Amino acid sequence: MRSSIMSSVPRPIRPLRCLVAAASGFLFAWFAVGAFETWREIRVQDWNDPDLGWLKIDFWARAAPVKEAAAAAVLTLLLALSGEFLRRSASALPRLLRWGSRTFGRPAGFLLVLALALAPRAVAVLTRPAPPAGAPNVLFILVDTWRADRTSFYGYERPTWPEIGALAQEGVVFERAVAQAPWTRPSVASILTSLTPSRHGAMSHMPAGSSRRFVALDRRHRTLAESLAAAGYDTMAISNNANIVPYFGFGQGFREFTKVSWEVDAGDMAADMERWIDRRDGSRPFFCYLHVTDPHHPYEAPEGFRGMWDKSGITDFNLNSAQIRKFHAGELDLGGGRLQHLKDAYDEEQRYTDSALAPFIRRVREKHPDTIVVLVGDHGEEFLDHGSLGHGHVLYQELTHVPLVLWAPGFSGLRIDTQVPLLDVLPTILDLTGAAQPTPEAMGHSLLPLLRAGGGEDRPAPMETGGDGEPPWQLRGIAMRYDGRLWKLIREEVSEVNPDGVKIHLYDLEADPLEQHDLARERPEVAEALFQAMKEHGWYILLDEVEGGTWHGGAGAAALQGDLQALGYLDGGEDAE
């Protein structure tokens, strides 16, 4: 009788067990969702270098799916309560709920799930490499579309960069740095890998249907970020150019990579990076890459800078992808002050960028005196200097001559009047940090000997248009000293397999720095000598030999298409397929 009475009395709810089960659900979801996010990130990032396997675990350890875990906790609590209310039922579902409540609502089950959730962090701590003792920080700032001869501390009459110019007196200015490509993706890839565009392969966004649609930086090539990450550096990047994103292979080696809209200006991006630097505990050196596009068209300087030089009153015309397409079709009228309006607006963008970056660089150097700072342009800009507009189409000085400034402990007040290719930037940073050696495939050489000597012999500098789908199809060239003169050879290769289609251009850069007098007919022996030098250095290969990963659109391409179109890299009528 007593047993019958007791069995009819409802058992009390065990709230503690339900709460412990909810906490277990929270931790398990934290673990599982973090694993899923890491798997998804690995598909975008390129963390396949054997030395960088720890980045995958590190990303998992830093994943913080709070909302998902909280939702799982609520669901687990409801399921546990359901199990409590249905304890007398013998059906399968209540039995399963009771089993879950017993397993994860007790201390042993909770501790098991807690250990599971903490495992990625523990493994990340154990597997992450230790940095070299005393390794300096590296701040790398790339200014998109930065033309050297419109930069005040390179001799331009307008004060476009007064604050950076003053800071540059405390560093090293390379007077004649040469970009390896006249548009962003191949140029930046060359800087970060020390390879020419034909070698690294990140050189095209061809029309839809092309076999080389959305070509990305191949993961087999080791980047500067990978070398420093493998040496124990904290690596972080912020970019507002849709070409420089993990989707196109530029996430290699970066622990964190933030892509922001092209409309976010340099000041806000620098502030975000400074906050990231300030939040760190300082136990490891950092490598930060900041890519800003303010001087890139469309030229729209913020208030306070707009109208500084542009007095045209033109408000309904700017340079964008649509205008560039009209130009190539012969439908764009640049009369009526329009061309000067573009030049003035471009200079205003430069002046703003100077005001945004100089205080940031100054503060970082004050807080972290051991920091190496690199400030460089990826390419210049065309204003009909040779009949073209924008960038990406030619290899003349207005596109390939870019500013390069270095601040490094032990070097100050230098101006190096020696031609150097941007291929040399990666070996120089690795040399200054002592963190790693360049890979055998790297084509550049450290600039440290030039820094110590205050100059030296001009270094050969290769360059390529990168085959970006605009006419002419492909230009390749070299600037180098030969027979006591500094020359530039440009090969206009309508078809790389048809010698009759190749046009040769040759310029004496010392006598003719604006490249107005083509000497190819007068000095064919010089053109041939420079072409042979290209081949001897491994800087000339046929396009069908280019090794690059090809990405055929998809969700990633569709997401980036708007920014690429806004920056003029895609025809607005194309699909991202």
Image: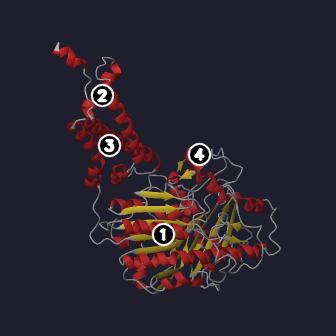
Q: Mark 1 and mark 4: span between their CA atoms? A: 33 Å
Q: Mark 1 and mark 3: span between their CA atoms? A: 34 Å
Quick one: label 1 or label 4, which is nearer the N terminus? Answer: 1
Foreground label between 2 and 4:
2
Quick one: label 1 or label 3, which is nearer the N terminus? Answer: 3
Quick one: label 2 or label 1, which is nearer the N terminus? Answer: 2
Figure quadrant of the N terminus: top left
Q: Which residue is mark 2?
A: 84
Quick one: label 3 or label 2, which is nearer the N terminus? Answer: 3
Q: Residue at x 65, y 53 (%)?
A: 497
Foreground label between 3 and 2:
2
Q: Is residue 348 above or below residue 413?
A: above
Figure quadrant of the C terminus: top right
Pick the residue in front: 316 or 157: 316
Pick the residue in front: 462 or 4: 4
Q: Which residue is mark 1?
A: 271
Quick one: label 3 or label 4, which is nearer the N terminus? Answer: 3
Foreground label between 3 and 4:
3
Foreground label between 1 and 3:
3
Q: Mark 3 and mark 4: span between their CA atoms? A: 37 Å
Is 108 on the left or on the right of 40, as rendered? left
Q: How many marks on residues?
A: 4
